[in-house]
Image (cartoon, rainbow, N blue to C red):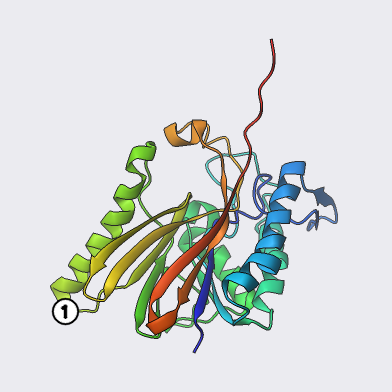
Amino acid sequence: MVRNIICVSDLHCGCQLGLCPPNVKLDSGGKYNASDLQRKVWTMWKYFWKEWVPVATKGEPFVLVVNGDAIDGNHHGSTTQISHNDNDQVSIAEEILFPIVNNAMCEKYYHIRGTEAHVGKSGQNEEMLARKLGAVPDSKGNHARWDLWLKMSKSLIHFTHHVGCTSSAAYESTAVYKELVEAYNEAGRWGDRPPDCICRSHRHRQMEIRVPNKNGYGIAFTTPGWQLKTPYTYRIGLGRSSTPQIGGYLIRCGDEDTLYTRFKIWKIEREKGDKI
């Protein structure tokens, strides 16, 4: 039995502020050289997989879940993309994820569809990426799906990309707790088993809550992302003053089959400011 799930999300490959290797070849034959900040995030990505994951998983196999927005798309009239060619963006994401998916310790790879504005209508571009990389297909044969239920030992875990957002740090936990409460409510209405853990993304910010229940506790969390601060984040309340949270999550089945989580997060230091 695999006892580890590694979850990453919001890579936004294809964006000048998204995750990117140092040098990228484009469909036209040209090249894009990553910015200094992108290179810094790339160093974090390499450390995450080469150093943090082997320690956090105790060197054991893991299941990879990419929880949406692996590519940036051509969205909202923005001009921050490396290329508006979808093939370029998918190719960048494929180059980044291929070594992880094909790592001997990666037992299975699942892909969740993100926001349509980023990944295409019905998540078609993320489906293209997941199919190329060989993600586990759903019952309809799709390699990228809108949500995922995974059973790990005695625990049931639910993944989907979207979650409510807020412009206030004081209310960051509200939508996360709401997701868990609504999952309990829906399961109770229909006599289904409620999840022991739910994973959401979309916000690019980590938040986690635990509540006591019959099995010990229920967990709900949101993942950090791998994208730097975009023009949009400078408009929203929480984004104007916050620094990007870069990193990923581990869900592990520990002793006595107890579920627990760990995460690795870096912050991008804010500018020191000018002297006058």
Quadrant in the picture for the C terminus:
top right
Identity of the residue furthest to the bottom in this view: 1
Residue 151 vs residue 242: left or right? left
Q: Residue at x 61, y 80 (%)?
A: 134
Let me know if residue 21 appears in the view. Answer: yes
Q: Nearer the viewer, residue 141 or 220?
A: 220
| Mark 1 residue element | loop
Q: How many callouts does the rendering have? A: 1
Residue 219 vs residue 224: left or right? left
Q: Nearer the viewer, residue 186 or 57?
A: 57
Q: Is residue 223 above or below residue 81?
A: below
Identity of the residue furthest to the left in this view: 189
Identity of the residue furthest to the top in this view: 276
Q: Residues within 10 Å of mark 1 (few under 14, many from 20)?
A: few
Residue 22 vs residue 92: left or right? right
Place of residue 97 in the rendered image (x, y in percent of width and height, measured from the top left): 67, 68
Q: Toward which corner of the image does residue 199 lie, by quadrant?
A: bottom left
Place of residue 1 in the rendered image (x, y in percent of width and height, measured from the top left): 49, 89
Q: Toward which corner of the image does residue 267 lie, by quadrant?
A: top right
Place of residue 25 in the rendered image (x, y in percent of width and height, measured from the top left): 81, 57
Q: Is residue 135 above or below residue 12?
A: below
Q: Nearer the viewer, residue 158 or 47?
A: 47
Q: Identify residue for label 1.
A: 191
Let me know if residue 108 appears in the view. Answer: no
Amino acid, disc 1: Gly
Q: Is residue 267 above or below residue 196?
A: above
